[in-house]
Amino acid sequence: MTVTPFRARVLSAAALLTASSLLLAGCASGSAAGKQTITIFDWGGPTGTGYEANNIRALYTPCATALGVDFQVDEPMDYSKIRTAVSSGNVPWDVMNVQNDFGVSPEELSPIDFSIVTKDKFSGSYAQQYRVGSDTQATVFTYNTTTFGSGFTSVQDFFDTTTYPGKRAVPKSLFAGLLEMALLADGVPADHLYPLDLDRAFAKLDTIKGDLVFWDTGATSQSLIASGEVVAALVWLNRADDAINNDHAPFEVYFDQWIQTDDYWVVPKGAKNPELANRFIECITDPAKQVDWSNAIVFGPTTKDALASPDLKENKRRPTSHMEGQVKVDDTWWSDNYKSIAERWNAWMTA
């Protein structure tokens, strides 16, 4: 099967070894004790403060202990695997961590049990029938401050290769972000993006196609930034932040307009133990755990108490610090149109 994740974060060999050792040890002890094991489908990511490592530290380990179960993690996330598993009736996961462009279809998911999960603790619209918010994320433009001086003044700057020559990195896999940014750069107001005018978006992309470098994993996008191979990029916020903080790349993030790419906890249709899955979700969305989680990464929490907590450290690159620039994604529109757009995108990219 061809793996086409919307956001495939690839673990290094060392990270795989570390994660595998941890998970196998947990499963082995659980098997001996006859404990239940909860299986989580997650994104993967680097060691240290990487996404999955932070999930294991701050969420999975303490909640598995609290519930008296073991856990194991399958990664990286792949929506095609989910749909195949649900169609076959052989679903190996209990809880899944998906982006906002997945999780609105009753054909693929079980409803969240709000007799177990506390609905009122979530902010905004993060408590939905089939999913609850995991974290607030962003897909952003990041730019080389040496090349761009004081920085982007508009989304149009990314598409202006005359004034600001140089290569731009964009995702190879289709997910919400690039088409929206192309339309914003072409003058479409943020509140009138949907339904996306695909002809207009692709025409705008045509103007810079010769300067595009396509990245296929988060690690690749970060490497392109850190190496200086590109002068600007459309990437997941954590990758830009890691390149700036850890790789010391002379880049900054443009927050005047950024694309909402939140994560959600869901229970797949056909999960073997949906009650345990919901109990686990209730635990991992505990506000105190969300604060601990957010303080170790650039993303923001989704519960009211976590967002208001005095223990949530200030972070100038956290998306919840720049909500005025958020461009909301129409999740239902993407769910309904993804397949046809993906076909057009792949044909355009390879032409």
Image: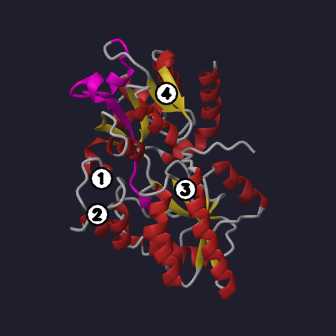
User: Label 4 amino acid?
Assistant: Asp
The disc at residue 15 is 3
Label 3 or label 1, whichever lies nearer to me, is: 3
Q: Secondary structure at mark 1?
A: helix
Q: Label 4: which residue? A: 197
| Residue 89 seen in the figure | yes
Question: Disc 2 to disc 4, how far (Cα)?
Answer: 35 Å
Q: Is 50 in front, or is 64?
A: 50
Residue at 50% over, 15% down: 210
In front of the other: 67 or 199: 67
Write the residue at 30% across / 33% down.
Answer: 250
Locate the N terminus by quadrant: top right
For label 3, the SS is: helix
- Label 2: how many Cα within 10 Å (few below 14, some 14–19, many 20+): some
Judging by the rendered image, the residue that carries numbered circle 1 is 320
User: Most extreme residue toward the bottom, as rendered?
Assistant: 33
> Residue 146 magenta-drawn?
yes
To which residue does mark 2 refer?
A: 307
